[in-house]
Image (cartoon, rainbow, N blue to C red):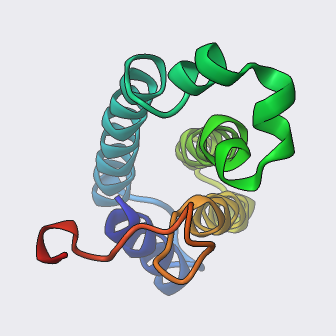
Amino acid sequence: MVGLLLLNMLRIVIQSGEDFDEADHRWSFRLVLATIINFVIGIYQFFLGEKGVALLDEFGWDYVIKYQDLRFWVLEHPLCMFVSVGSIIYAHKVLGANSASSHKKSLLFLAIAFFFILAATPWPFRDIAIARPYFRGLY
């Protein structure tokens, strides 16, 4: 998904003076489709997985908010991903305007989504309770 996001951002920068054509709409639609699939999988994991609602049921809101690792999985990660999904979908909607300013608006919202995705990713260099390895099968 991040690869499609970067590809769409690059296409917008390269074609900033031109109108959007059918290929741009297809690439944007692919990004939206991949985003929605990832979002549905994330919603499933949040409600039925071990992190998310299960942590809330076990500890409660007061306990979860006090600890950084629990707060990340229950509140920060889902909220940032929700904002990024909304930004990607809105950037796709802006493409329909087909004006000169739609390039800038679309690029802005894709950049916002990229920032939130990077901020909410459990990178290996983050706190030990949040961090996940790059390749889980190798560890």
**Residue at screen point 36% across, 59% down:** 24
| Residue sitting nearer the eye, 18 or 61 | 61
**Residue at screen point 66% across, 56% down:** 99
**Residue at screen point 38% across, 17% down:** 48
**Quadrant of the image containing the N terminus:** bottom left
Q: Could you tell whether 33 is left or right of 58 in the image?
A: left
| Residue sitting nearer the eye, 114 or 105 | 114
Residue 67 horizontal/vertical position (percent): 78, 48
Q: Write down the quadrant of residue 5 in the picture.
A: bottom left
Residue sitting farthest toward the left: 137
**Residue at screen point 49% across, 34% down:** 51
**Quadrant of the image containing the C terminus:** bottom left
Residue 103 horizontal/vertical position (percent): 63, 65
- Looking at the image, is 79 positioned above or below residue 98? above
Residue sitting farthest toward the top: 57
Q: Could you tell whether 137 is left or right of 100 in the image?
A: left
Q: Could you tell whether 49 is left or right of 139 in the image?
A: right
Residue 84 horizontal/vertical position (percent): 61, 49
Residue 96 horizontal/vertical position (percent): 55, 41
- Looking at the image, is 101 positioned above or below residue 81? below
| Residue sitting nearer the eye, 139 or 95 | 139
| Residue sitting nearer the eye, 122 or 107 | 122
Tally the numbered discs.
Answer: 0
